[in-house]
Amino acid sequence: MRPVRQNDKNGARGAGARRGVGVLALALLASGCAGAPAPGADGGAGGAHAPRAAHLEGPAGALAAYASRLRAAQVRRAAVARRWGLTAVPLTPPAPPARKPVIETRKGFEVDGQKERGLPPVFTTVPTKDKVVFLTVDDGAQKDPAFLRMMSDLRIPYTAFLSDFLVKDDYGYFRRMRDRGVTLDNHTLHHPYLPALSYARQKREICGMQDVMEKQFGRRPTVFRPPFGNYDQDTLRAARACGIKYAPIWNEEVFADHWEYREEDQDLHPGDIVLTHFQGREQGTGTMPEMVRRFLRTVTAKGYAVARLEDYL
């Protein structure tokens, strides 16, 4: 048998320590993520666990401090949720997929020659097993600062589809939205019923909005939503000519006082795209924060997180 040298013994002790730290990591992370204590119940952000962490040295102490920070972060998230009228903390989405799903037009939503011409796919749901949904907000009529604060405070991702005739009176509002990480996409210049227009006029509506988006917000989107969810072959041809790669519509629509579902089961599904609008009491629909509360209460209760649509495209 080969004699054990001193550095072998040290290595064995180090491996044992690492294994012990790994076990401690699991225990601490489990205790930190299983549930948040009530604010103030553990003596503040570090809580009653912080002194224990202080007595640990090396990796174990660093790990205990990390777990304490996780618990404190969960307490803060719970406090933010309560401030916005939510009893349950919104769920955190998984990391974006390393391999993006293949997006195809939903069956029954095709136009003639769609695949052959390479036209943008029209879809209501992203193919994923992740228990996530995607919130999209259309038009731009209501410019509620409380909505911006709420979504930033709660860290809820969403995508805005903008029509120029509704947003041009306050581009700054949507620049602030962009600066908070929200993706701004194309919803035409004037929100017309596109199938009633010629190809040239449809192209003017879509490409014209591309020009506005580039001038006002610094980028030409690759995602476009046809107004009312109505389109024909000319719509998708024009969209492709304007640099559009995807044309998502929606599977559910949420209002401040109710939901509407496309599917017969009247339920959410992994990868569903949810529509709402920049509307307020002036449109008789309730406030934007009221809509967000209804949306988040439903998706959270059903075990869904809200993910960023563009992360899956």
Image (cartoon, grey):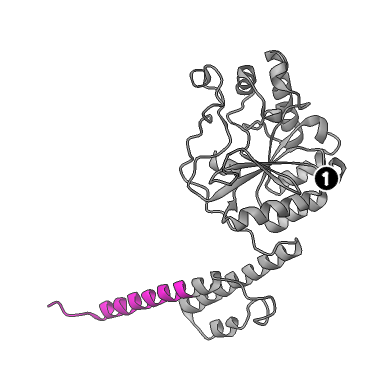
Query: From the image, which quarter does the C terminus lie in?
Result: top right
Choose between 138 and 281: the one closer to the eye: 281
Q: Position of residue 311 (x, y in %)?
A: 56, 44
Residue, disc 1: 280
* Magenta stretch holds residue 26: yes
Choose between 116 and 61: the one closer to the eye: 116
Magenta highlight range = 1-27
Q: Secondary structure at mark 1?
A: loop
Q: Position of residue 73 (x, y in %)?
A: 63, 68
Q: Main secondary structure of the magenta part?
A: helix
* Magenta stretch holds residue 309: no
Q: Is residue 16 left or right of residue 121?
A: left
Q: Residue at x 54, y 42 (%)?
A: 312
Q: Quadrant of residue 301?
A: bottom right
Q: Is residue 203 visible?
A: no
Amino acid at pointer 1: Gly
Image vertical order of residue 16 relative to residue 204, above or below:
below
What is the residue that sits farthest to the front in this orientation? 264
Q: Position of residue 190 (x, y in %)?
A: 78, 26
Q: Is residue 158 visible?
A: yes
Q: Quadrant of residue 39?
A: bottom right
Specify few, some or many for label 1: CA neighbours under 10 Å numbering under 14, 14-19, or 20 or more. some
Q: Quadrant of residue 150?
A: bottom right
Q: Residue at x 63, y 34 (%)?
A: 249
- How many marks on residues? 1
Q: Is residue 85 left or right of residue 19?
A: right
Choose between 94 and 132: the one closer to the eye: 132
Q: Residue at x 22, y 79 (%)?
A: 5
